[in-house]
Image (tube, rainbow, N blue to C red):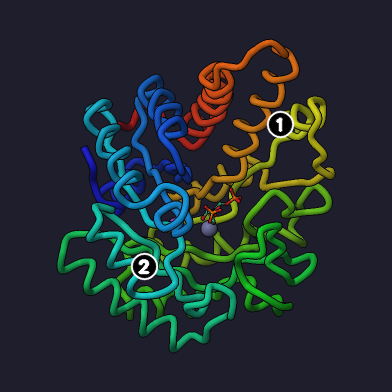
Amino acid sequence: PLITLRQLLDHAAEHGYGVPAFNISNMEQGLAIMNAARACDAPVILQASLNVRNVYAGDRMIVGIVEALAEMYPDNPICLHQDHGHNEQACVSAIGAGFTSAMMDGSLMGDGKTPADYEHNVDITGRVAQIAHWIGASIEGELGVLGSLETGEAGQEDGSGAEGKMDRDQLLTDPDEAAAFVKATKVDALAIACGTSHGAYKFTRAPDGDILSMTQIEAIHKRLPETHLVMHGSSSVPQYLQDVINAYGGEMPQTWGVPVEEIERGIKHGVRKVNIDTDCRMAMSGAMRRFAIENPQAFDPRAFILAAMAELETLVRDRFERFGAAGQA
Ligand code: G3H
Ligand code: 13P
Ligand code: NA
Ligand code: ZN
């Protein structure tokens, strides 16, 4: 069945686990993730970006896929979540289309690029949370701007996210401000900034406390023990996937993501939703590259896509297990 983010994360908090939130844009990602969830008996968060809703797939398609998955996998509760809405319309239209949850990311202005001030964020997030709660959906808010503590920039290869250089204090969510924000907006979950960023190029070296601040999460959880925390930019950018991509014709410069052990540490301190997109992209495209090189005679696209689905299923199952979501459906 489709359930709300609040229902799903309340259970996660009660039982002390984290739920990976995987971005999807198509049926095959949905099937691979649900196969992994069924195999290890996990609850699922599937999220779609505005790009997927408006450009790549369309609302009718993405909601139709997830509703079909909910019928096909009746033992796995699913939350369908709108990722990074930057205005009222993005969030309310998602809920109208069948999403059970939306992220009102008021840390940036409506353009999705300009860092917003606290007053704008509180005002728009509180209003959207009120509307969502009237109609039985959940809202995730964000306080603090995602970006690299190394460079002060969002650092995304696709150019989305904050534009321009940011100060260290904008890139680390303040615990007292977080407490005031949650109280004022009544969000169901709070995304916080701790030095992660979106995309594959998060860190130029293996991250340590100077560039990834898990102590910030511990401080926020101490201040707000009841709030479900969300970690964006949580791909680990695993070396084995970089190696597959580069061994079969890809050209990805060496990079580092968020170590899974650091996410496990966050889950011990209130992190309940863990956003992962880049790792899934790398698993699928790496497997397709390998399949193409190893099977030069192949031309049925299903064979390429099945190889990609198998690699994604392996990755997803590992995250369900390591985050403690396995066995919790
Ligand atoms: O945080 C953003 C997601 O990774 C979505 O990316 O807009 O390319 O679908 P997208
Ligand atoms: P990654 O780019 O690290 O996978 O993060 C995805 C994300 O935060 C989506 O909201
Ligand atoms: Na989100
Ligand atoms: Zn994000």
Relative side of 127 to 204, left or right: left
The quadrant where residue 244 appears? top right
Look at the picture and state if 243 lies above or below 217: above
In which quadrant of the rendered view does residue 147 lie?
A: bottom right
Label 2 Cα neighbours within 10 Å, binned few <14 / some 14-19 / many ≥20: many
Q: Quadrant of the N terminus?
A: top left
The residue under label 1 is 241
Residue 190 at what x, y percent from top left?
Answer: 42, 64
Q: Position of residue 74 (x, y in %)?
A: 22, 28
User: Of the residues shown, which amino acid type is indicated by label 2?
Assistant: Ala
Q: Nearer the viewer, residue 276 or 249?
A: 249
Does the rendering let one see residue 28? yes
The answer to whether 80 is drawn above or below residue 74 in the figure is below
The kind of residue tagged 1 is Leu
x and y percent of residue 64 in the render? 28, 41
Query: What residue is at 74 percent from the left and 58 percent from the top?
Result: 209
Q: CA distance from mark 2 to mark 1?
A: 33 Å
Residue that appears at 40% across and 33% down: 27
How many marks can you see?
2
User: Which quadrant: the C terminus?
Assistant: top left
181 or 235: nearer the eye? Answer: 235
Rendered residue at 79%/25% (across/down): 248
In this rendering, position of residue 119 left or right of residue 202: left
- Secondary element at image label 1: helix
The secondary structure type at the circle numbered 2 is helix
Q: Nearer the viewer, mark 2 or mark 1?
A: 2
Q: Residue at x 65, y 78 (%)?
A: 169
Residue under circle 2?
A: 90
* Residue nearer the viewer, 33 or 246: 246
N-terminal of the pair, mark 2 or mark 1, is 2
Badge 1: residue crowd in 10 Å (few <14, some 14–19, many ≥20): many
Residue 245, horizontal then vertical, whole percent = 75, 31
